[in-house]
Image (cartoon, rainbow, N blue to C red):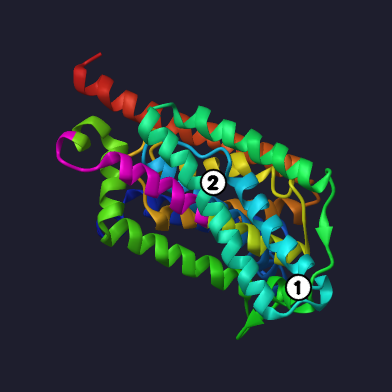
């Protein structure tokens, strides 16, 4: 049975699925409030913010890079939307202003990603350095334009988008699941998705095979920036305010979610479904610890321990297998 499931689902998905079951069993015994509609409703509301930023991080990692500017790209995009609403009456702004602001927010996020991708592709600078520079730039620009404060006072329908539901499903969760489906199609059925894996596996071999790697990298980071903008819009709607520092703690957790989901930190391998399972596990862990009275700092520490454990198991196991094969 296990062999059949492994063949059908893959080792990563099967392992994460079993771990998810273990987490649910442990916390269901530890707290009688864990297996409740209220708890799972809370998880469904909190998951989209981290999930969208993780999707934004996923593409650069698969290509062998990294995008350290995901949270600040999301925030500057949300600030763009907020400024448009403020310029059109603030609480009295209409839905047309929201649509216009959202389009401009997507344009700003895409532009930030485009610049990063172009610099990485054409200068061959390391993605960590490029995205770090973009992160510093966007943070400084946002702090200058907002004077370190936040922007609030939006129409009532904005809060409804962040806290509303459709057929009982939270609206932000619907947005997130739609983006998961989009990423699944992109990576599994498009030329760019195939090129993303090729670039992450061996960029020089990909270049010699005739693929325009510069164009591919630029598109990868542009799409990452667009997903950051979607995350920023959702975060603004849920918090009903926006500032430069929103979601700062999510940055490293997005990397954790990718690695826990089996994405190769050097690029070339990873699945959207595995990352989705990893996100659910992390959110359930956080929720379970909160129900047991632990604060958010302990949850963050536990997430860090999981990242260490995952790295030890994945790379230590590979090293052990290689040593056995070599007889050392």
Q: Is residue 69 left or right of residue 263?
A: right
Which quarter of the figure has residue 302?
top right
In the image, residue 226 sits, relative to residue 99, either above or below, namely above
Given this view, does label 1 or label 2 mark the residue nearer the observer?
Answer: 2
Numbered circle sitting on residue 120: none
Q: Disc 1 marks which residue?
A: 159
Mark carried by residue 112: 2
Which quadrant holds the N terminus? bottom left
182 and 119: which one is in front?
119
Magenta range is: 208-226
Q: Residues within 10 Å of mark 1 (few under 14, many from 20)?
A: some
Looking at the rendering, which quadrant does residue 160 occupy? bottom right
* Label 2 Cα crowd, 10 Å radius (few <14 / some 14-19 / many 20+): many
Q: Is residue 274 above or below residue 324?
A: below
Regarding residue 74, the answer to whether it shows in the image is: yes
The answer to whether residue 280 is visible is no
On whether residue 210 falls in the magenta region, the answer is: yes
Q: Residue at x 46, y 29 (%)?
A: 312
Side of 282 relative to 326 (left or right): right
Say what secondary structure mark 2 lies in.
Answer: helix
């Amino acid at each position: 049975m296990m062999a059949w499931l492994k063949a059908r689902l893959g080792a990563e998905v099967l392992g994460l699925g079993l771990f998810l079951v273990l987490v649910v069993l442990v916390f269901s015994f530890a707290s009688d409030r864990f297996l409740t509609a209220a708890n799972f409703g809370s998880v469904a509301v909190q998951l989209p913010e981290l999930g969208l930023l993780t999707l934004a991080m996923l593409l650069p990692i698969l290509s062998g890079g990294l995008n350290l500017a995901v949270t600040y790209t999301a925030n500057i995009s949300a600030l763009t939307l907020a400024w448009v609403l403020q310029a059109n009456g603030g609480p009295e702004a209409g839905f047309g202003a929201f649509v216009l602001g959202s389009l401009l927010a997507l344009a700003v996020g895409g532009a930030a990603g485009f610049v990063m991708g172009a610099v990485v592709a054409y200068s061959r600078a390391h993605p960590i350095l490029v995205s770090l520079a973009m992160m510093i730039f966007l943070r400084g620009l946002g702090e200058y334009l907002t004077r370190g404060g936040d922007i609030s006072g939006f129409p009532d329908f904005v809060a409804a988008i962040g806290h509303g539901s459709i057929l009982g499903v939270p609206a932000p969760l619907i947005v997130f699941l739609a983006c998961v489906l989009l990423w699944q199609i992109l990576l599994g059925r498009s030329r760019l998705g195939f090129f993303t894996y090729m670039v992450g596996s061996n960029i020089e071999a990909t270049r010699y095979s005739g693929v325009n790697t510069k164009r591919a990298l630029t598109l990868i980071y542009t799409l990452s920036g667009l997903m950051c903008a979607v995350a920023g819009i959702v975060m603004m709607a849920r918090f009903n305010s926006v500032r430069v520092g929103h979601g700062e703690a999510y940055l490293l957790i997005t990397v954790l979610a990718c690695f826990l989901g089996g994405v190769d930190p050097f690029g070339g391998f990873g699945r959207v479904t595995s990352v989705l399972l990893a996100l659910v596990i992390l959110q359930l862990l956080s929720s379970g610890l909160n129900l047991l009275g632990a604060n958010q700092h302990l949850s963050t520490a536990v997430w860090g321990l999981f990242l260490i454990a995952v790295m030890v198991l994945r790379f230590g196991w590979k090293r052990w297998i290689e040593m056995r094969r070599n007889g050392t």
